[in-house]
């Protein structure tokens, strides 16, 4: 038994010595001091420019309008960036994914979830919401309102604004008249193509 114990102690000693020999001095790893010159990077400077879009820790909420929909604490009726057709297309997709189940694709508030018993939201086309500032819609998407949950964790900040822009398009569509329709499109509006009969397709 004593011999076995001596062997075990010897083995432990060998392992400890081996581990000591494998020491890696990470605290002595090569590094650059601030403003030190470099022979590797273009321009000879070791300090590298920030990647475009980088936000310093603790400063991600500096853009009040973008992050809250407000300016000086008041809901603003403007957007934090220019809205393009591509933005509206994304806004439509996000709206149909997250909003239409309650608000319906038309914004009337009779979506499929509502038809199954969920509390009906007001139509997006009533006067109160037609004239509500854009920042109010952004705030509701971000923080929720009433029985509407917050979508902060599901929808990116910029996409919330794109949804708001698409809501404005929906609202404008309900205020339009024939005079707003380009002449080239009036023919299609007055004479829509017939839809296939579902019963005929079944045969």
Image (spheres, rainbow, N blue to C red):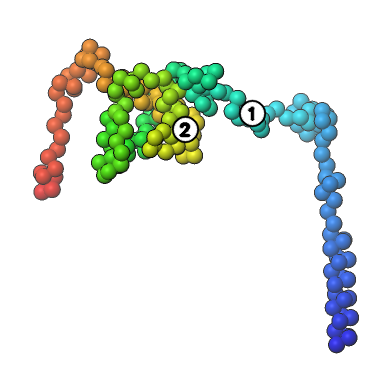
Q: Is residue 105 visible?
A: no
Left or right of residue 92: residue 11: right
SS type, badge 2: helix
Q: Quadrant of residue 133?
A: top left
The image shows residue 200, relative to residue 11, as above or below, that is above
Instruction: Identify the residue at image location x=84%, y=46%.
Output: 27
Distance between mark 2 and mark 1 Cα atoms: 19 Å
Q: Quadrant of residue 83?
A: top left
For disc 2, the neighbor class at 10 Å (few under 14, some 14 to 19, many from 20) is many
Q: Which mark is residue 142?
A: 2
Picture coordinates of residue 14 (x, y %)?
87, 70
Left or right of residue 120: residue 202: left
Left or right of residue 135: residue 181: left
Q: Quadrant of residue 178?
A: top left
Instruction: Identify the residue at image location x=15%, y=21%.
Output: 190
Q: Is residue 33 visible?
A: yes
Picture coordinates of residue 22 (x, y %)?
84, 59
Picture coordinates of residue 194 (x, y %)?
13, 32
Left or right of residue 8: residue 183: left
Mark 2 or mark 1: whose residue is earlier in sequence: 1
Mark 2 in CB contact with mark 1 (< 8 angstroms): no
Provide the residue designation for mark 1. 59
Instruction: Identify the residue at image location x=85%, y=87%.
Output: 1
Picture coordinates of residue 153 (x, y %)?
49, 39
């Amino acid at each position: 038994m004593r011999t076995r114990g001596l062997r075990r102690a010897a083995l432990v000693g060998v392992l400890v010595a081996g581990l000591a020999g494998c020491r890696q001095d990470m605290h002595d790893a090569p590094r650059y001091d601030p403003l030190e010159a470099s022979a590797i990077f273009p321009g000879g400077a070791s300090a590298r420019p920030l990647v475009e879009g980088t936000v310093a820790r603790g400063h991600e909420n500096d853009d009040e309008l973008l992050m809250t929909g407000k300016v000086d604490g008041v809901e603003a009726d403007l957007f934090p960036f220019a809205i393009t057709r591509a933005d509206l297309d994304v806004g439509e997709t996000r709206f149909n994914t997250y909003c239409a189940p309650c608000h319906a694709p038309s914004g009337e508030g009779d979506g499929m979830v509502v038809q199954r018993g969920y509390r009906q939201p007001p139509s997006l086309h009533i006067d109160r919401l037609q004239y509500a500032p854009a920042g109010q819609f952004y705030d509701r998407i971000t923080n929720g309102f009433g029985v509407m949950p917050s979508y902060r964790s599901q929808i990116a900040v910029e996409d919330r604004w794109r949804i708001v822009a698409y809501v404005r398009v929906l609202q404008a569509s309900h205020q339009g008249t024939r005079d707003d329709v380009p002449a080239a499109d009036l023919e299609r509006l007055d004479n829509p193509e017939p839809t296939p009969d579902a019963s005929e397709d079944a045969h």
